[in-house]
Amino acid sequence: MVYLVGSIVFILISVFVMKKVDVINPFSKGILLGIVLSLLANMSLAENVANNLQPEENDGYSIRNGIARWILGDDGGILVDFKSAFITSTYFTLLFLVLFVVVLVIETRIIKNKR
């Protein structure tokens, strides 16, 4: 949860700053930041799932990296929860990719129409 809130705040502040300094296509670049943060979350959650595939070797289930801990919390969990979080994160990444293309096309058309 901390990761999600922090990412949203970071993206909104970045878009606001890019808009203030007249960066071209600030909204699509903000979504691109979302894609990068989402991919980072995917990698962390995938590592967590992979590390917990054999709980006997690891003394049970655990959260092994900081980003996965920010996403999943400190409560521990079970493998099904870890996989569910990874799948949800993957869907969000795909949604960001589609949204990036749509917003980029819209921003480009708006800029073209202003000329």
Image (cartoon, grey):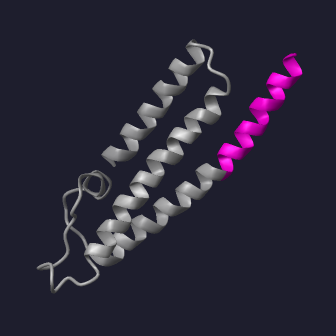
Q: Is residue 27 left or right of residue 64?
A: right
The number of callouts visible is 0
Is residue 7 or residue 105 the one in the foreground? 105
Please identify the dominant SS of the magenta region: helix
Is 100 in the magenta?
A: yes
Q: Residue at x 78, y 35 (%)?
A: 106
Above or below, 18 against 73 in this view is above
In the picture as drawn, the residue positioned furthest to the left comes out as 59
Q: Position of residue 28 (x, y in %)?
A: 64, 35
Q: Position of residue 26 (x, y in %)?
A: 62, 27
Q: Position of residue 9 (x, y in %)?
A: 42, 32
Q: Residue at x 28, y 51 (%)?
A: 70
Q: Position of residue 62 (x, y in %)?
A: 19, 69
Q: Is residue 101 left or right of residue 31?
A: right
Q: Residue at x 47, y 51 (%)?
A: 38
Q: Please report the bounds of the magenta region as a residue range.
A: 98-115
Is 30 in the magenta?
A: no
